[in-house]
């Protein structure tokens, strides 16, 4: 691991903390967005977004 490139781990931390805070402070099923026939639970939107950030940042750290 190159200690000069420690900033790459910042996005890993953001993903982990984002997922943990979403699970700790939000409840599924409380806020449901309805657009026509599509129903979307607002709990899963940040969960998926932070999961994508985590997956992309971990793959970048592993590749470097």
Image (tube, rainbow, N blue to C red):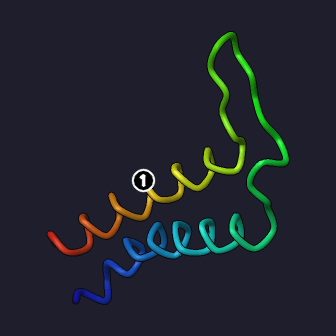
**Residue at x 84% of width, y 48% of height:** 30
Q: Residue furthest top?
A: 36
Counting from the top left corner in percent of width and height, residue 31 is at 83, 41
Mark 1 crowd level (few <14, some 14–19, many ≥20, 10 Å Cα): few
Furthest-left residue in view? 63
Farthest right residue in view: 30
User: In the visual, does 64 lie left or right of 30?
Assistant: left
SS at circle 1: helix
Determine which quarter of the picture holds residue 9.
bottom left
Quadrant including the C terminus? bottom left
Q: Nearer the viewer, residue 59 or 23?
A: 23
Front residue of this view, candidates 34 and 1: 34
The part of the image, by quadrant, that contains residue 39 is: top right
- 34 or 21: nearer the eye? 34
47 vs 32: above or below = below
Q: Quadrant of the N terminus?
A: bottom left
48 left or right of 35?
left
In the image, taking residue 52 as reference, residue 31 lies left or right, namely: right
Question: Of 7 and 16, which appears nearest the observer?
Answer: 16
Residue at 79 percent of width and 61 percent of height = 26
Image spot of residue 36 (x, y percent): 69, 10
Residue 56 drawn above or below residue 20? above
Query: Measured along the vertical axis of the image, is residue 62 above or below residue 34?
Result: below
* Residue 25 point in image, percent of width and height: 81, 68
Q: Dot 1 corresponds to which residue?
A: 52
Residue found at x 35% / y 64%? 57
Residue sitting at x 62%, y 20%? 38
Q: How many marks?
A: 1
């Amino acid at each position: 691991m190159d200690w000069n490139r420690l900033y790459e781990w910042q996005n890993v931390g953001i993903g982990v903390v984002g997922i943990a805070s979403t699970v700790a402070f939000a409840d599924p099923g409380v806020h449901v967005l309805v657009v026509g026939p599509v129903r979307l639970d607002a709990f899963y939107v940040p969960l998926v977004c932070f999961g994508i950030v985590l997956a992309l940042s971990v793959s970048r750290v592993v590749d470097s």
